[in-house]
Amino acid sequence: MSRRGWVLFAAMGVLWGIPYLMIKVAVEGVSVPMIVFVRTAVGAAVLLPLALRAGRPTWLRDRWKPLLAFATIEIMIPWALLSDAERHITSSMTGLLIAASPILAVVIGRFTGDAERLGLARWAGLAIGIAGVAVLAGPALGDGSPWAIAEVLLVALCYATAPIIAARRLSDVPSLPMTAICLGGAALVYAAPAALTWPQTLPEPRVLAALAGLALVCTALAFCVFFALIREVGPSRALVFTYVNPAVAVTAGVVVLGEPLTASIVAAFALILAGSVLATAQRPAKDAATGAPVGSRG
């Protein structure tokens, strides 16, 4: 990987590892619809002008149904559930539970037509990852936060499902216009609920800073860096940074917010990360004539 690729990779590990911290701060002063609206509206305002440079989205008429499904499952539902869940559980726990998304993606793919055979290592990865989720979620269930845990796991399920829709129905759609349109549509959906729950007094500076960070840094800038990373290293390598996000989320929660770093959190992180790596590992294809691996990257 080039130096530029490593820089973009590191940036994405941070940019999509800190939203949980910022959401935790934002929910202290504004409503859930307000958080989602600000994040999507500002993100769309930044990305739409960039997307329009590529011309009118002529593909929109034919692809609006899968695009609507993708926007709903990737943005509209999970961003609201995340914000509501973090009113009750820590940001570090939220980030770790979301890390189960790759494991859920393997399960969903298996039941929706993915013909790839799961070997022993991938089955072991699924079991290890699920064990990690149980280690993390078990104590929280006993502390009276079962609904918050369910919300985050539903978010993980959404994050596992949306890429499958994109890969199967939107693979030839340009990423930047697609993202800008999805953010704009989500902003329209949340505009009325945000207006109805608009704060009567100006929120504290730290809440305003968290909202600005979510919108400008974790959404608009993050998507721009993500697209640059895809162009630099390809889509498969670009997604490896998702294994770094949980560590960033836990570190940010512990250092900035003083959230506890318990033995169960460390154990769950190790189990979920190991399970995700094993469950998503792909066996190299074999050349029919020589039996040698093909398509490997140097």
Image (spheres, grey):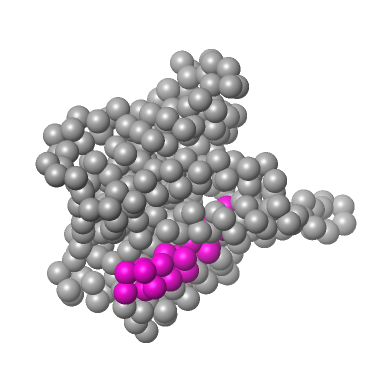
Q: Quadrant of residue 1?
A: bottom right
Q: Is residue 211 above or below residue 119?
A: above
User: How far across and down, in percent of the image, does residue 32 sit?
Assistant: 22, 46
Q: Is residue 66 above or below residue 284?
A: above
Q: Quadrant of residue 171?
A: top right
Q: Is 245 on the left-hand or right-hand side of 27? A: right
Q: Is residue 85 visible?
A: no
* Residue positioned most to the bottom: 263
Quadrant, the C terminus: bottom right
Q: Is residue 173 above or below residue 290?
A: above
User: How far across and down, in percent of the image, does residue 97 sit?
Assistant: 37, 63
- The residue positioned 57% from the left and 55% from the top of the image is 11
User: How far across and down, in percent of the image, does residue 275 sit?
Assistant: 50, 69
User: How far across and down, in percent of the image, does residue 289 sit?
Assistant: 87, 52
- The residue positioned 33% from the left and 52% from the top of the image is 210
- The residue positioned 23% from the left and 53% from the top of the image is 204
Q: Is residue 154 above or below residue 45?
A: below
User: Which one is nearer the viewer's eye here, 158 or 253?
Assistant: 253
User: Which one is nearer the viewer's eye here, 275 or 260?
Assistant: 260
Q: Is 3 on the left-hand or right-hand side of 42? A: right
Q: Is residue 3 visible?
A: yes
Mark count: 0
User: Which one is nearer the viewer's eye here, 297 or 43?
Assistant: 43
Magenta stretch containing residue 47, yes or no?
A: no
In magenta, the rendered stretch is 239-258
Q: Would you say the magenta stretch is mainly helix, strand or loop? A: helix
- The residue positioned 35% from the left and 33% from the top of the image is 41
